[in-house]
Amino acid sequence: MRSKLFVPGSRPELFAKAMASAADAVSFDLEDAVAAERKAEARACVAAMLDGLAPEHGKTVIVRVNPTDGRYFADDLAAIIRDGLDMVNIPKAETALQMRAVAAHLGEIEHARGIATPIRILANIETPRGLRLAAEIAAADPRIAGLQLGLGDLFEPHGIARTERETVRAIQLAMRLAAAEAGIPAYDGAFVNVGDPDGFRAEAAAARRLGYSGKSCIHPSQIALANDVFRPSAAEIAHARRVLAAAETQLAAGTGAFLLDGVMIDEPFIAQARAVIAQS
Amino acid sequence: MRSKLFVPGSRPELFAKAMASAADAVSFDLEDAVAAERKAEARACVAAMLDGLAPEHGKTVIVRVNPTDGRYFADDLAAIIRDGLDMVNIPKAETALQMRAVAAHLGEIEHARGIATPIRILANIETPRGLRLAAEIAAADPRIAGLQLGLGDLFEPHGIARTERETVRAIQLAMRLAAAEAGIPAYDGAFVNVGDPDGFRAEAAAARRLGYSGKSCIHPSQIALANDVFRPSAAEIAHARRVLAAAETQLAAGTGAFLLDGVMIDEPFIAQARAVIAQS
Amino acid sequence: MRSKLFVPGSRPELFAKAMASAADAVSFDLEDAVAAERKAEARACVAAMLDGLAPEHGKTVIVRVNPTDGRYFADDLAAIIRDGLDMVNIPKAETALQMRAVAAHLGEIEHARGIATPIRILANIETPRGLRLAAEIAAADPRIAGLQLGLGDLFEPHGIARTERETVRAIQLAMRLAAAEAGIPAYDGAFVNVGDPDGFRAEAAAARRLGYSGKSCIHPSQIALANDVFRPSAAEIAHARRVLAAAETQLAAGTGAFLLDGVMIDEPFIAQARAVIAQS
């Protein structure tokens, strides 16, 4: 999921265009993009859309529900869980226990409805506690298929400026390490200034250098930017091929580590080269 | 407490001037600024000062006591606890258990002396363990009213240079997130080079961009700098007013999130705008 | 151990030169630098070298063994534990429990073989879990004599670029604070580009500003660089002497803190000055 397009659940007129876009994933939002008095309406719109999904649409279909401790959560899940929904996006993930409760809840609904493929969880890290406990959240349940960063919620209520590059990088790194520990992907959050493609690209590129797999898009114009940044470059693919070729020769000769262009290459470098080839 | 002036407890000749200064808070120090052989004398000076406080002086009155595991702590508390003392500043806070013991100790003395308003705790984060466990320290007891950063103690004994901007920012961010998790303010520590107002201002401004509420001052010349940096600017107040006005219109129209000057505004942004107006 | 030279255990022709080098420590590697089919051979080479060590060679002798949960670990320890081995370097340290198991294992072999001086453990922090739990790892057992950073293993499998200065610094800082909490030294890892002495020097200097004690060398040309960077400079020694002289005068006069060149000096600064003199 290099690109994940957010669509307000209360705007069904945008759904078809989103599903026809170049985004790898579409995330229908029932939370922050929908005002309180339109929650029920949005829920019904998203449910109807899920029922009418074309076969082989090729997208990862996600619904962001409302917070687990709020009054909308149970109704959100009841309305949307069905075959065809790939992931539930849980806002404000804060503890492993909370994630296990969500997983159990999903399991019950799936069992009652005869849904064969477990719906995965995308957990939003967007509070100080969630960030501190992100490694435990990521490892809480096998359904947890990724962590997604939410800088708006993490920073704004506490007066932390998003303009500081080093602050953003430190947070991105912390969440990335948590996801890496659990062996699941990390996704960068939204970039709010939709009129600044260079800013989007810079933030996405920084996330990619930290090993992120993709980024949220809140405007269709951001999709191509995300797809481009998170695709391995020709140079990266070529370098990975050289590392793997050299490794084959060297390991056959009984060498555990070797120099390539003056850089010592050993197992972790070889594993990363394999990952680049797999992605390309 | 945008500005908090430190005054050595052993220098009573400075007390009146400190209480007449523009500092939001005055912190009378019994710890590092007082040599071992003058601890008892300093304690008596501070106690006498507390007894003679003018009514409606308008300052937050703080005493920094000696470490909780040392030989001065119990005598420090016994000497200073009374009506008129707002906060006890605990150096080298390291665990939640330690903070709960301090809170219980304060409660006993208050009960014995018939003090009605619980004295609050300002916990200094100034050791590696304290920083690692800062979120638990901040949440340990309702008396804990703030975390305060101590870079001198944190860095010097371990040979960590304070000259590295990125090191200082990383530590400031870590403590800020811990305070934010508990919903209490974070205060930046002292800036030791009293002849460098630009350096003070830069460090204070960086702390403010991380959501800090104020900074320690070790010289009267630093007070105006701190008050200025931690006061919301006219531009910030104007922007916050625009966000709140737009939110009123948009939320009335049933929109959960909206664009303002090309930036997506939702609940966390609105909460931050409210906080700016409250501070101004 | 300002400089620690890595030598593949499967290359005995390099051993004598390594022991004759200017490195403070030599680390014979049985792990990543040795291919699977040569593990037994490397183990025998290293054991023979340990048996033939010259008296008073003046170096700290370290062997990096294979991972504790793998098929080589027990044989590695059985082959190498003897008088003359100073430290076992444990790759991929991840939990305190794992470290205590290693310590117990070492104790059993030492007891069986009548080895009087406990062999110390150098724990490699090179996975996300190891980094998260580094403070607990460092404090797990009194044998743990240092933490050593491994950025290759930490970054490469997760696609984290090592080219980002701020990422490297953040990781270095996190491990440094963990070691500091336990009161043990931190050692920076290898710099893989052996043809870039300026890059090595810059990374070593950054580590030193974070309070690191030394750095791994994977080529003899890096030894002099490491020894130079981690030696206190003449200016640092002179400054430390001035701090200690001023402290003696001021503390005799009953002052707990004082100004030196406009900077407030108190106990942590004095402790650091003493450490610099001790190192020089």
Image (cartoon, coloured by chain):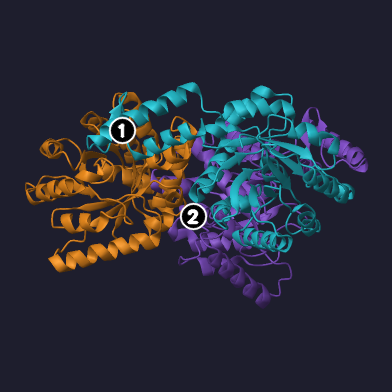
Chain colours: A orange, B cyan, C purple
What's the CA distance linking mark 1 and mark 2? Answer: 67 Å
Q: Where is residue A34 in the image (x, y as percent from the top left)?
A: 24, 42
In the picture, measured across the screen, residue A91 lies left or right of residue C70, that is: left
Classify 10 Å Cα crowding around label 1: few (below 14), some (14-19), many (20 and above). Answer: few
| Percent coordinates x, y for residue A110 in the rendering | 18, 64
Is residue C189 in sight in this rendering?
Answer: no
Q: Quadrant of residue C51?
A: bottom right
Rendered location of residue A248, percent (x, y): 35, 48
What element does badge 2 sit on? loop
Is the residue under label 2 in contact with that under label 1 (CB below 8 Å)? no
Give the residue type that dot 2 points to: Val
- Quarter holding the N terminus of chain B is top right
The residue labelled by disc 1 is B248
Count neighbours of disc 2 (C-alpha within 10 A) and say few if under 14, some if 14 to 19, many if 20 or more: many
- The three-letter code of the residue at mark 1 reads Glu
Q: Mark 2 points at which residue?
A: C34
- B104 with respect to A72 (left or right): right
The outermost residue toward the front is B55
